[in-house]
Amino acid sequence: MLHFIFGTRAQIIKMAPLMVECQKRGIKYNFVFLAQHKETMYEMMDKFGIQSPNYVLGDVGKDITSAASMFFWSIKVVIRGVLNLKKMFQGDREGVVLVHGDAPPVLLGALLAKLYGLKVAHVEAGLRSFNYLHPFPEELTRVITWRLGLVNYYFCQNEIALKNVEKYRGKKYLTKYNTLFDSWELAKLADSKTKVDIPRTKYAIVTIHRFETISRRTQTEAMVKILEKVGKKMNLLFILHPPTKVALEKFELIDRLKKNKNIELRPRYNFFEFSKLVRSAEYLISDGGSNQEESFYIGKPCLLLRYTTERTEGIGKNVVISKFDMRIVEDFVNNYEKYKISPKKFVKSPSEYIIDVLK
């Protein structure tokens, strides 16, 4: 049996196409939900048309966002998981557990799978920034998972990622693109049924959520200053993640944004609504690696509010790493149209390929 273990929004967006592919083929799977993120998760499961979780572990009724809460939540997940391994994995001793990316559930899920004697497949494996603080804690999470020998099958989205895991035990596979590509295809198919308020004037999308961006006042304020500068040239839709809103309120910066007539604050959307907004935008401003990839796949200019990135998609093409340097920001804003590229196409979807291999 195939077992899916994940617990964040980014993970459900990228794992859902694999579950949809299983459903298309009539392949039974077990879904274990590590509820690191709770808000809107069940709504997204419904939007993608995947089955409800067979087993829920770590649900505390709210999103786990701070470093301290993440630490104690992880300990509880491991303890409760160990006590319920047989029930969680439905007594299956020969299956493969699929984990994803670099959030804590990848390490926790792989560890629990190994404790029960199951094999582990890591989807979106091989990404490295080679800087343990950027992104934090993601870079540490994936390296620890590999070094502990928890992974049997590595599914890598490009040759560089493949090379990054060649020294670790296990079989390696090249998917060429990330399963995120399939997610956007699914969202595009649902466009006619997706209702969202799209501005009539030109606009750019802003989405910020990373720990290193919003955990310190100096960095958060630097981000706000950049948005204020960009807002003089382009209307901005700032999609507020709950942790980002909390940080802006904590550092007393949110009123500056609310008073700015060129920046509109909006609540977080589900993936289908968000993807429709992005497709209609002039460009994207983000600190997220997934957003970097998404912009590359659809050919949208992207200003990345980071100092470095573990992903190669779009670098030197449609993606510009700001390094929080106002000169780089201004050059991008003034010349963003030159960063538009053609949308990507594939012969075979990454999700189809992965399920073929595992089958």
Image: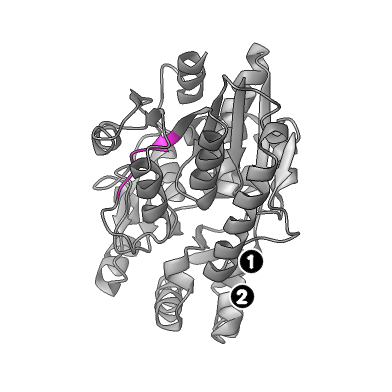
- Determine which quarter of the picture holds residue 96: top right
Residue type of the residue flagged with mark 2:
Val
In the rendered view, does 58 fall on the left or right side of 237?
Answer: right
Which residue: 61% across, 28% down? 3
Query: Which x, y percent locates residue 185?
Result: 55, 30
Q: Answer whether residue 238 is visible to the viewer in this image.
A: no
Q: Name the residue under label 2.
A: 246
Furthest toward the bottom, the residue is 252
- Determine which quarter of the picture holds residue 16: top right
Asked if residue 138 is positioned above or below residue 299 in the image, the reply reads below
State the residue in front, 17 or 286.
17
SS assignment at label 2: helix
Q: Mark 1 points at which residue?
A: 242
Which residue: 63% across, 29% down? 189
Do tag 1 and tag 2 residues touch (Cβ < 8 Å)? yes
SS assignment at label 1: helix
Asked if residue 338 is positioned above or below residue 188 in the image, the reply reads below
| Mark 1: few/some/many CA within 10 Å (<14, 14-19, 20+) | some
Q: How many marks?
A: 2
Residue type of the residue flagged with mark 1:
Pro
Write down the region rendered in magenta. Answer: 123-128
CA–CA distance in space, label 1 to label 2 = 6 Å
Query: Which x, y percent locates residue 318?
Result: 32, 47
Query: Which x, y percent locates residue 80?
Result: 68, 49
Which quadrant holds the N terminus?
A: top right
Query: Which x, y percent locates residue 36?
Result: 63, 54
